[in-house]
Amino acid sequence: MSILIDEETRLLVQGITGGEGSFHTQRCIEYGTRVVAGVTPGKGGSEMLGVPVFNEAADAGIPLVVCITEGIPVLDMVMVHNYLKNRSTRLIGPNCPGIISPGKCKVGLMVGDIHLQGNVGVVSRSGTLTYEVVAQLTSFGIGQSTCVGIGGDPLPGSTFVDILKLFQEDKDTKAVVLIGEIGGNMEQEAAQFIKEKMTKPVVAFVAGATAPPDKRMGHAGAIISGSSSRAKDKIAALANAGAVIAPSPAEIGLTVKEALGK
């Protein structure tokens, strides 16, 4: 059982009629994901890879939507948040690699081969660092329960706290790796939740320690716009909440191994 996808969940993949969308949908199907519907506005009623395509998702009551799309304007995401406010649909993304429960299914861009089924959850704002962390964990023989890329935009559909709540409740997750970065205050909110609610060990890394102020670094949300946006303030908050801080990206896997050893 994963935190977002169980054996009864029917999956929806957004935008499967495009070249890249259909490519990754095919990879998801090959991994074992049961794709029963696709969404591409304006192409409802068509079919791709044997999967029917529809125009809407939230209106149909789909419980989980994963949006990979990069470059969605912030004002558009404000409208999306407002639209989903009183609906049961959970949005992962945008500007994210997706989610995967190793050995079960994936929805997104992740390469399945680097993952190993296990009991460490991963939640990250950075897609690239997600892959790096997973590869390190797998090299140490540490499997993953579910890996969630929440995306690097300023207004993601799901936050660190949203996913940490699910990991805390998940019986198959014994520890969590959290990958943050500069910009916003999601890491501080996560630290507060870890301090008050988490009973499972958390290993954290925050990217962007050397980033200059007012320069966007990589993601749309990765910009230092105040003291709380800086990596050192996020690291301090997470450390004070009891998270184990990995000193560098190259040492995240080792830090998790040592934390689990304790």
Image (cartoon, rainbow, N blue to C red):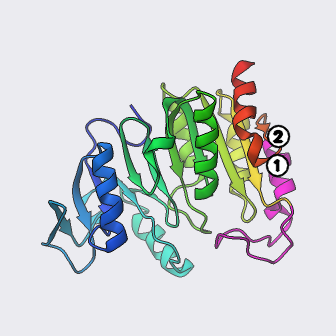
Q: Which residues are magenta?
A: 210-238
Quadrant in the picture for the C terminus: top right
- The residue depicted at 33 percent of the width and 37 percent of the height is 6
Report the residue marked by disc 1. Answer: 235
Q: Using the image as rendered, state which of residue 239 and residue 117 is in the foreground.
A: 117
The type of residue carrying mark 2 is: Ala
Residue 131 falls within the magenta-colored stretch: no
Q: Position of residue 252 (x, y in %)?
A: 72, 40
Instruction: Write down the residue under mark 2.
Output: 239
Question: Residue at the location (69% across, 23% down)?
Answer: 260
The kind of secondary structure the magenta stretch mainly shows is: loop
At mark 2, the secondary structure is: helix
Q: How many marks?
A: 2
Q: Who is closer to the viewer here, 261 or 150?
A: 261
Instruction: Give amino acid for label 1.
Output: Ile
Identify which residue is drawn at 80% across, 70% down: 224
Q: Position of residue 225 (x, y in %)?
A: 80, 73
Does residue 160 show up? no
